[in-house]
Image (cartoon, grey):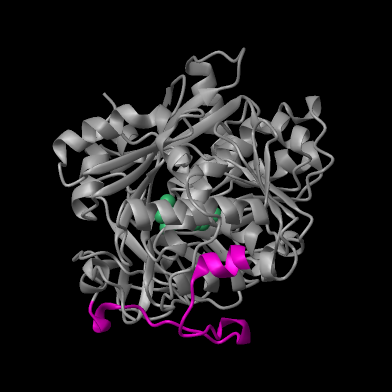
């Protein structure tokens, strides 16, 4: 049975614009009919494991797999019976991470709908763009984030129905759920029915929506988690990325459920509250961004983090200095991994045993990766080029000409400049369009940042190229100093000398500007474009 609402299949890229999908692991032989909510949730209950802990809220409230299934079934009934949801219909989801938000994602999957997560920090303008682009008429929204969505609705009248949750006992969604039986027949979806539209956290231009099938979610579960992370059923996951970001959806919901583990969903997970939450919940697997590890390293001694077993970093390159700080503070070697919204999750990474400071790692089993030149020829080891990857997941933009830039010759081009070193490790350089060209040299801003971060006075930094009459561009560093450090010319000179001694001298920042903070996205990424346009 095909989906009733054909908006998504009608707007998939044509076959010739799709990347090549590779399913060469035996675990990737997935059935033609597949519903990821049935695999992640119902399977445990059917196997007699319904009593296992599944979702844990900040206040310690716990839903077992069986309890979550009851909530998801009632929610799916509200969607289908009260709101008329048909298969293939998009549902906007909005809220900070919480068990109810997780139940919303799973209920949409189970009912055969398409979940469209929105980051809590998005405002009316961005929300209305998403509503228009994905043609959304139904939303489930945390009551505390109602205002921005209401404002978006005025600009995007396509959105007709908004049901609020998490607003206390009388929240409309919970009330509607209470009236429903605890059973629901899972939608009979095809493995290649779309279940998720993930809007890219792109910094400029019109947002792009990456479409993912039920198959993609389960394929991701079969690659990086068992081969690199290796979680166990008794693990307790915790972390900061929002469920609206595929880093968070995978790391904090889908991957723990794939192994029957528990996950702590925190509404607030900034570096000042995360260590206490890890201690409180005895969490064992942590997902967060490099800047968060750096910020937490100084305070972890005040908390009991003895439960922590695995620490995952993604979203931005992990500087060697941050890896070292975290290891000193906790004894744990971070698992770095590069993923993208388009690929759903991590495709190059290394476990603790293969971690190499400054490198991202090796292609994840199930994925292939290479570094190519402008003519799409693989470059020799040690040469910088464009990263190309393929695997069981890949880029499928919703009705977007930019599909042709991300996918070329069947490969996904992530927009990153990489090199492969003598050990076969993939070493991140910069975003392709962030390479600084100064006096004829190609300089990668992140390499200069990594050098600066080794200096004890530096808390955070961002490095960009700025126009220069003589050199085309010069390297400029924006530096946030640690408390008590003087932001003066002597410090600037000391940092410049330090970089010259640490990496090739021509890469040193000819301009240094001190600032109180750096502009970052909700997902922890440095917003270089804001540094470039800074007065
Ligand atoms: C950069 C990294 C170096 C890189 C993501 C894990 O970040 C995620 O998705 P986005 O679509 O951004 C993708 C881009 O971010 N990047 C991410 N991780 C790393 N650069 N080292 C890393 N470890 O430029 C990439 O192209 O926001 C990450 C899982 C799921 C995700 N969606």
Q: Where is residue 424 in the image (x, y as percent from the top left)?
A: 61, 73
Say which residue appears at 75% left-offset and 55% top-offset: 52
Tell me if residue 220 can be seen: no
Above or below: residue 180 compared with residue 228: above
Say which residue appears at 75% left-offset and 67% top-offset: 48
> Which of 233 and 510 lies nearest the eye of the viewer?
233
Residue bounds of the magenta highlight: 14-42
Quadrant where the image shows the N terminus: bottom left
Say which residue appears at 68% left-offset and 66% top-offset: 44
Q: Position of residue 40 (x, y in %)?
A: 59, 65
> Which of 223 and 506 lies nearest the eye of the viewer?
223
> Which of 172 and 205 lies nearest the eye of the viewer?
172
Above or below: residue 216 compared with residue 15: above
Hey, which quadrant is residue 398 in on the image?
Answer: bottom left
On screen, residue 473 versus residue 264, left or right, reads left
Q: Where is residue 255 in the image (x, y as percent from the top left)?
A: 61, 60
Residue 20 located within the stretch drawn in magenta: yes
Q: Position of residue 176 (x, y in %)?
A: 43, 43
Quadrant where the image shows the C terminus: top left
Hey, which quadrant is residue 61 in on the image?
Answer: top right
């Amino acid at each position: 049975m095909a989906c009733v609402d054909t908006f998504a299949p009608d707007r998939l890229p044509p076959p010739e614009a799709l990347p090549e999908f590779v399913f060469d692991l035996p675990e990737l032989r997935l059935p033609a009919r597949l519903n990821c909510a049935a695999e992640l949730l119902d399977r445990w209950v059917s196997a007699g494991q319904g009593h296992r802990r599944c979702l844990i809220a900040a206040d310690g409230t716990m839903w077992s797999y069986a309890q979550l299934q009851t909530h998801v079934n009632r929610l799916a009934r509200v969607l289908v019976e009260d709101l008329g949801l048909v298969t293939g219909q998009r549902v906007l989801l909005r809220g900070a991470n919480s068990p109810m938000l997780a139940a919303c994602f799973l209920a949409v999957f189970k009912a055969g709908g398409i979940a469209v997560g929105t980051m809590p920090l998005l405002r009316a303008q961005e929300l209305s763009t998403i509503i228009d682009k994905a043609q959304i008429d139904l939303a489930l929204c945390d009551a505390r984030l109602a205002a921005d969505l209401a404002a978006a609705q005025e600009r995007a009248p396509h959105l007709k129905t908004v049901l609020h949750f998490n607003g206390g006992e009388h929240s409309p969604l919970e009330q509607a759920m209470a009236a429903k039986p605890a059973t629901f027949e899972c939608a009979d979806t095809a493995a290649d029915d779309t279940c998720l539209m993930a809007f890219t956290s792109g910094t400029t231009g019109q947002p792009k929506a990456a479409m993912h099938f039920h198959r993609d979610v389960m394929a991701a579960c079969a690659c990086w988690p068992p081969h690199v992370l290796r979680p166990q059923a008794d693990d307790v996951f915790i972390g900061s990325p929002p469920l609206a970001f595929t880093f968070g959806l995978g790391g904090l919901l889908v991957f723990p459920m794939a192994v029957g583990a528990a996950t702590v969903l925190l509404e607030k997970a900034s570096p000042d509250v995360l260590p206490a939450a890890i201690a409180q919940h005895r969490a064992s697997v942590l997902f967060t961004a490099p800047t968060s590890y750096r910020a937490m390293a100084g305070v972890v001694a005040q908390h009991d983090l003895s439960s922590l077993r695995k620490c995952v970093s993604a979203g931005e390159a992990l500087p060697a200095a941050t890896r070292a700080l975290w290891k000193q503070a906790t004894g744990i070697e971070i698992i770095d991994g590069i993923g993208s919204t388009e690929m759903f999750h991590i495709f190059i990474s290394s476990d603790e045993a293969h971690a190499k400071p400054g490198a991202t790692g090796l292609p994840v089993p199930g994925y292939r990766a290479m570094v190519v030149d402008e003519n799409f020829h693989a470059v020799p080891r040690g040469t910088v080029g464009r990263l190309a990857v393929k695997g069981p997941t890949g880029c499928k933009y919703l009705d977007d000409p930019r599909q042709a830039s991300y996918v070329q010759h069947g490969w996904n081009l992530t927009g990153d400049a990489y090199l492969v070193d003598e050990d076969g490790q993939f070493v991140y350089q910069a975003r392709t369009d962030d390479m600084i060209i100064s006096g004829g040299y190609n300089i990668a801003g992140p390499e200069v940042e990594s050098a600066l971060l080794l200096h004890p006075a530096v808390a955070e930094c961002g490095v960009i190229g700025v126009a220069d009459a003589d050199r085309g561009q010069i390297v400029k560093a924006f530096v946030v100093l640690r408390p008590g450090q003087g932001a003066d010319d002597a410090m600037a000179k000391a940092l410049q000398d330090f970089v010259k001694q640490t990496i090739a001298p021509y890469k040193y920042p000819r301009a240094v500007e001190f600032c109180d903070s750096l502009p970052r996205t909700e997902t922890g990424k440095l917003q270089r474009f804001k540094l470039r346009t800074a007065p």
